[in-house]
Image: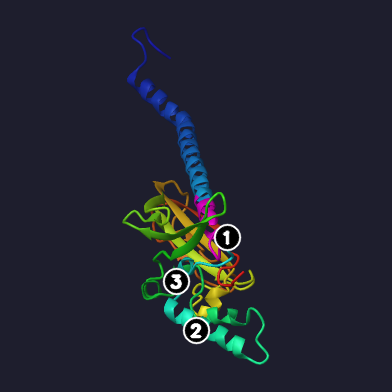
Amino acid sequence: MTNKKGMTLVEVLVYIVLAGFLLAPVIMLMQNSSVTMARDAVNSGMKMSGREILNIIYDDLKNTGYKLKPDFTVDSAAFYLTDKAAFHTADSTCKAQALAANPPKPDGYCDSVIFDFDGSSFNYANKIGGGNNASSPNKPYFDSLRVKMGKLSSTGAWVGVDTIWYHVRGNDQRLTRDISGISGTRTDVLAKNVKSLKFRYSADLDEWVDAPDAVQEKASIQYIKAIVVLMDPKKLSPVNNQVITVIDDPDSTVSVTLPDTGKFLYERFEIVVPIPNNGLLP
């Protein structure tokens, strides 16, 4: 009730309190909706970024492995040989022995000589199980991988060899793709705020290994699995202390535990790439 002079101070305070009660849910709803929209936008952006990264890795890795020249020979520069001179000596000796044998050995008899050397087209650095990660299990895992690719021109002529190196560097944890070789030298930053870069290897898609140390095992690898975990620095996650499992192998317990309490968002991406003829002569 008002008098001729207007509302009293008490009435104004009552109306303000009532308005506050009525508007509080609306304000909270608008705030939550705003955060949800921002989180959805970030998630969508991270998914797009992750898919683009996997597409680039896929294109690079699927083109590694033995590439034949037009004369059906191979270029040893396209492979990681621990001792090229020793390999060629062993190969020549084997072929000479094969010809001198009675009866002569069949064609392809000396192909196995490649297994005495590193005949694969990739070179890796495995970080899982290393000293830093063993003593600090909350640290993210940053593998690196180099692949060699023999390049042909549009007419099928042999051009040369490129080496591509995937690794994570910098305080902002940049996923970097370095190219060197016949295509020149270039560095591409594919993503920032990368929490994990992991590569695994398999000969048959049945058993996966993190470190194919033996030359024979490494040369027989026909599949590489790339795993990338991205983080967004905005504090939009509804929960704290997320745990991201890097390796989804049921026999493995390896995971990245993220101790950040800032509610950052994370996304994990994975792809399997076939690399035919990695260490086996066509």
Q: Which residues are magenta?
A: 53-67
Q: Which residue is mark 1?
A: 70
- Mark drawn on residue 12: none
Q: Vertical placement of 259 versus 24: above or below?
A: below
The reply to whether residue 191 is visible in this rendering is: no
Determine which residue is flagged by label 2: 90
Amino acid identity at mark 2: Ala
In this rendering, does residue 189 appear at all?
yes
Work out whether mark 3 precedes mark 2 in sequence or the reverse, and give the earlier one: 2
Q: Single out the mark in the foreground, 1 or 3.
A: 1
Q: Residue at x 48, y 66 (%)?
A: 78
* Structural distance between the alpha carbons of marks 1 and 3: 41 Å
Look at discs 3 and 2 and give the one toward the viewer.
Answer: 2
Residue 114 shown in magenta = no
- Quickly name the residue at label 3: 128
- For marks 2 and 1 on the same chain, the one whose residue lies earlier in the sequence: 1
Dot 3, how many residues are within 10 Å of its Cα: few (below 14), some (14-19), or many (20+)? many
Distance Cα–Cα, label 2 vs label 1: 25 Å
Label 1 crowd (10 A; few <14 / some 14-19 / many >=20): few
Q: Position of residue 210 (x, y in %)?
A: 50, 72
In front here: 197 or 26? 197
**154 relative to 7, above or below:** below
- Identify which residue is drawn at 47% across, 36% down: 34
Give the residue type that dot 1 points to: Pro
Q: Picture coordinates of residue 33 (x, y %)? A: 50, 36
Q: Based on the displayed image, in which of its 4 quarters is residue 86 positioned?
A: bottom left
